[in-house]
Amino acid sequence: MVLSSADREALCALWRKLGNNVSIYTTEALERTFLAFPSTKTYFLHLDLSPGSAQVKAHGQKVADALSLAVDHLDDLPGALSALSDLHAHKLQVDPINFKLLGHCLLVTLARHYPGDFSPALQASLDKFLSHVILALTSNYH
């Protein structure tokens, strides 16, 4: 699954449209993930996971920053996300399936907020992008 020039254009256009609100949507996606897939809470037992909590918002910002970094480095996702991959694989020992669950919830969140923009083509482009991000994040798992 290679990101075509059309995929890249659609992704960059979406990211420009999201602007400074990326963390709002990643926070909502986290909240959806915790609600729909309770097993994902395992890694956050030390946090207040109630909707709207400062700790969930802070982690949502981290997710937003990582995805924005990925958008800015589409030609080298493994390099750009190497430190995060190492952190999640070795220190946090996060089960890689959780990245897919969060990615799914992000797709749902963005489709909900941007129904007029969220065409099947945009969904396919965003899904490809998230698949590449997940592949990069799991590259340090052995």
Image (tube, rainbow, N blue to C red):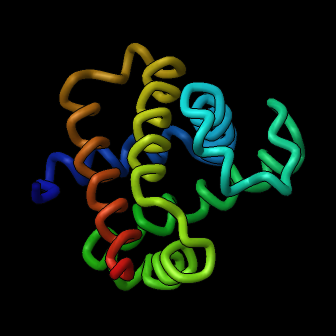
Spot occupied by residue 121 in the image (x, y as percentages of width and height): 19, 30
Q: Looking at the picture, tell me which residue is in the foreground, 45 or 73.
A: 45
Say which residue appears at 28% left-offset and 31% top-offset.
123
Depicted 71 relative to depicted 101: above or below: below
Picture mark count: 0
Compared with residue 90, is residue 60 higher up or lower down, i.e. above or below?
above
Residue 31 vs residue 134: left or right? right
Direction from residue 44 to residue 54 in the image, left or right: right
The answer to which of 137 and 17 lies nearer the viewer is: 137
Position above or below: 63 against 142:
above
Say whether residue 8 is left or right of residue 35: left
Which of the image's four quarters has the C terminus?
bottom left
Residue ID at (60%, 54%): 64
Say which residue appears at 60% left-offset and 29% top-offset: 32
Q: Which percent across, then down, holds residue 46? A: 85, 56
Above or below for 6 versus 75 = above
Which picture quadrant has residue 59? bottom right
Quadrant where the N terminus is found in the figure: bottom left
Q: Position of residue 50 (x, y in %)?
A: 84, 33
Q: Determine which quarter of the picture holds residue 21.
A: top right
x, y percent for residue 18:
54, 40
The residue that appears at 55% across and 71% down in the rendered structure is 93
